[in-house]
Image (cartoon, rainbow, N blue to C red):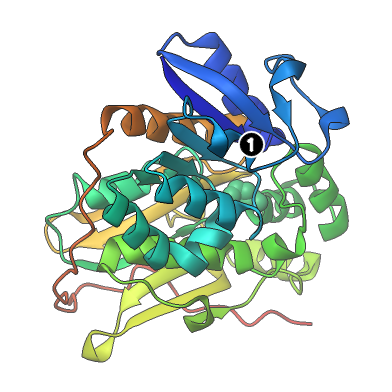
Amino acid sequence: MIGVALYGCGTVGSAVAEALATRADGFELRHVVVRDPHRLRTAAVPRALLRTDWRAPLADPGVQVVIEVMGGAEPAGSLIRGALRTGRQVVTANKALIAAAGAELEALAWARGAFLGYEAAVAGAIPVLDALRGPLAANRIRRVAGILNGTTNYILTRMEEDLLDLPAALRQAQELGFAEADPGADLSGRDAAQKLVILARHAFGRWLPLERVRCEGIEAVTGGDIDDALRAGERIRLVAEASLGDDDEVVLEVAPRALPAVHPLAAVRNETNAVAVEGDLCGVVVLAGPGAGGKATASAVYGDLLRAAGSRGRPLAPLRTRHPSPLSTGTDMLPSPIVISS
Ligand code: HSE
């Protein structure tokens, strides 16, 4: 049996615990760290496993893998560093932390021979990081662009199809468990920007600071903007894009765009995410699927968990820095960001 400590038991943590309880893959859940033990939302976690002290599981030599799905900077950062320093395998869905400290944590994992998996941090169940690192690795990537935030896509879809206003659509997204604890991170585009930084790392082989993302959210999008777009045969979507510009610079941008209805990203509805990867060999590959919610995120967490178990003592090699990609001569994949009326 492989001993597991689970940090966080909210929407995602509960789904992970339920997956662990219903699959016999040789994992033993030994600790579940929560902020408030009175708010346990799943029967899959025996109360005897609950802890509030994040240090306790790291003192247990029976814990080999740590799953962090609590989110936030702390104690997530400290517990992940503590786990990696002691050679534990780590799986996390923490996009804010990985976007801010991914370079340092990857170096630490590599130095300690530990696995650090964060597929769940980007685009929920869509295995896009794995695809860039594996099957698409031969490509010189020119661009990755996608819908990386389920909450805002859900809101835009409900505004478009049910004529809801933004606050009402946000309430629905919160009830469905898609939104961040601070939904401002979804609405402002910050959540998508964090995911874009991680995606760019895998597409272009470099960690770039979050401040490099030109970021505009959907707060100012009105029903009138959506109507205007519909009349023009377009759909408004919050698009995150990383592209290789002049001088091998990676340009990062999150902004609402009016996409022609026939564009592959325009057809993406509700909490679905999609990522289009443009490479010199693969052309444009589009991956789509559930991007938010407990089960979708648990799918990616559990996949990394299986990989962590298989990779013990055999850490994944650091990503190599990719060669600059020659600029494609094809037509642009996306129209420019739209100007939203205020
Ligand atoms: N709040 C995020 C979203 C959760 O809506 O996409 C998944 O990262």
Quickly name the residue at label 1: 56
Under circle 1, the secondary element is helix
Given residues 6 and 136, the one toward you in this image is: 6
Residue type at mark 1: give it: Ala
Asked if residue 270 is positioned above or below residue 320 in the image, the reply reads above
Given residues 262 and 291, the one toward you in this image is: 291
Given residues 157 and 10, the one toward you in this image is: 10
Task: Tell whether 183 sits left or right of 59.
Answer: right
Measured from the top left, where is residue 234 in percent x and y?
A: 56, 63
Q: Is mark 1 within 8 Å of ligand 1?
A: no
> Is residue 321 visible from the viewing direction of this image?
yes
Query: What residue is shown at x 45% (from left), y 59% (from top)?
Result: 146
Number of numbered labels in the structure image: 1
Measured from the top left, where is residue 198 in percent x and y?
A: 42, 62
Task: Tell whether 245 sits left or right of 5.
Answer: left
Quarter of the view holding residue 225: bottom right
> Is residue 260 visible from the viewing direction of this image?
no
**Quarter of the image with the N terminus in it:** top left
**Quarter of the image with the C terminus in it:** bottom right
Measured from the top left, where is residue 113 in percent x and y?
A: 27, 46
Query: What residue is shown at x 41% (from left), y 59% (from top)?
Result: 105
Measured from the top left, where is residue 125 in percent x and y?
A: 47, 37
Asked if residue 153 is positioned above or below residue 87 in the image, the reply reads below
